[in-house]
Amino acid sequence: MYQALYRKWRPQTFDDVIGQKHITETLKNQVRTGRLSHAYLFIGTRGTGKTTCARILARAVNCEHPVDGNPCGKCAACRGIADGSVLDVVELDAASNNGVDNVRALREEAVFSPAAVKKRVYIIDEVHMLSLSAFNALLKIIEEPPEHLIFILATTELQKVPATILSRCQRHNFRRIETGELADYVAHIAEEERFRLTREAAELIARLAEGGVRDALSLLDQCSAHETIDVDAVYSTMGLAGKRRIEDLLERIIEHDTAAALKAFSAMWMEGKDPIAVLGELFTLMRDTLMLRVAPRGGAELISGGHELAALRRFAERLTSEELCAAMETLQSALIASRASKSPRSSAELCLVTLCSSLLKQDMPDFNARLSRIEEQLARGEFSASAARRAPIAEEEDEPFDDEPPREDEPCFEPERYEPAPPWERRADEAEEPDFEAFREEQPEDAFLTAKRAEPEEKKPEPPAAPPAPAAPVDDGQFWKELCGRVVARLPIDMRIYPGDGSKLRGRLKGNVLTLEAESGFIFNRFNRTEILQKFSDCAAELTGQPVNAVLREMSAARETRSLDELRAFPETRVIG
């Protein structure tokens, strides 16, 4: 009968246990000197050797001929404990025996002396699953057990074990196995089993195991169906996308290319990749990028090792810490929702759409991320050119945008273009223009000493200034159509429906300033981005042949316009009193 690799290669001595030398050496010395504790508590994550060390310790304390603190494995006690024929060594699962009645039965049985070995040993796995009453029933016998009795407790959740139990036990903390050491162990097992395993695949298996030997051997056992176990075989067996495809997916997210990101995810879905695994790999990539960004010098020791440092540094330069934290929070929520959802694919797609469009998530982490992006661009000087182009905006009048053109019978006054009418065109009741030069000659010499601005000594006649060019008809004219045609091709695909819709977005060119008005709310927030306004500026400059500066305002309600004749016909208000 075939036996799983993690059972077949379970260590039989303390020397065979990898990665826990700080614990195995202590236990060997205690067995060698006979200074054993009456209760042990082994703490650590899954697959790090807690139960294995408990079994080895049970054999070592009962071994007839121990070898340097290790069980010999040949005597009757070692063989009997290994095959389960010695009933004085009992292994219990607290997950299924967590009641107070189970502990009472154990306590009544434990007082009897062992029949076949020197010590009666109770191994209680997942001890944190015991109820409070069961812990209370266990307190007294753990505190003052018989001389022949040893308790070995194992748990993965220390915080659930009462302090009264902790104070009565000798604690040993099992740590995760380092990736390099675990990869060497996996390669050794593969060589013994005659598997064709590449070094890159061994390192990948070690990273996926997250420091657990049992998980690593289970993954190796699962991949053993392939003739050659390489990186692609591991990715295919585990349903993973691979580092290159995940890095490409993150590139699409950074570029806010929603269509490309969804297309890449759909291709992975059709190939049988698990949506939860894809989001998990993306989360790991962002986590490594964040570690490298917040700790540039020591970050290489904090990353998982699944991606090359060059790729991580490239992402760290393009993303801020706030953006990474906000994206990781979105991914974490999506991972939780995907596990509970009937359609993990939809949850993953919704997460990708949210990551590509920051405007869809209006919470505080997202606002902090967007603000950090602006601050970083300002620190790099990327806004200096645009600020110089936007300098004339302060001089531009903040006039409302009229929805309708003025009527023919309504006078339109433009102060900068106004010139006085010649005398023969003036009405009889219209006063003549005063002669200011004659007035100055009649005044005394000191009349203008208190003037705020000095007159130039000689003023040369200036040629009459040409009237400024009228504003280009952007609303309904050919210019706006050509501008929309150019801009639409450069906008993201989800924004291309708005420039042609006059009720959502409209514009007007006056001089070198292109004033855009967008519908308040979602549309205004969507277009209120530096890179979007720059596209309008560039396209307008291509059409006009001169630099154009684009500004955005919220669309105001249409004003009711009245002609001058209507105002004159309005009845005069009289005050009576």
Image: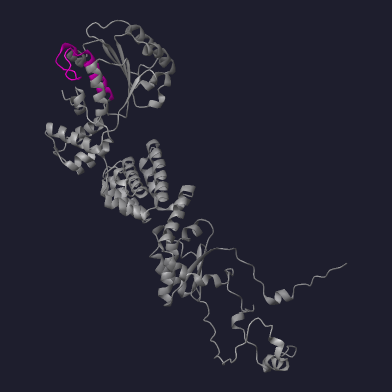
Of the 4 image quadrants, the one containing the C terminus is bottom right
Q: What percent of the width, then of the height, locates residue 239?
A: 26, 40
Q: Is residue 514 above or below residue 269?
A: below
Q: Left or right of 424: which side holds 189? A: left
Q: How many marks?
A: 0
Q: Is residue 83 magenta?
A: no
Q: What percent of the width, then of the height, locates residue 533?
A: 45, 65
Q: Nearer the viewer, residue 216 or 66?
A: 66
Q: Is residue 507 visible?
A: yes
Q: Is residue 62 magenta?
A: yes
Q: How is the image coloured?
A: one colour
Q: Is residue 129 above or below residue 103?
A: below
Q: Is residue 434 visible?
A: no
Kindly indicate the quadrant of the structure image that contains residue 218: top left
Q: What percent of the width, then of the height, locates residue 191?
A: 12, 34
The residues colored magenta run 50-77
- Which residue: 46% across, 48% down? 365
Of the 4 image quadrants, the one containing the N terminus is top left
Q: Residue furthest front?
A: 33
Q: What percent of the width, then of the height, locates residue 110?
A: 32, 8
Kindly indicate the quadrant of the structure image that contains residue 164: top left
Q: Left or right of 245: which side holds 511? A: right
- Which residue: 62% across, 80% down? 415
Q: Residue furthest right?
A: 577
Q: Is residue 565 above or below residue 261?
A: below
Q: Left or right of 284: which side holds 426? A: right
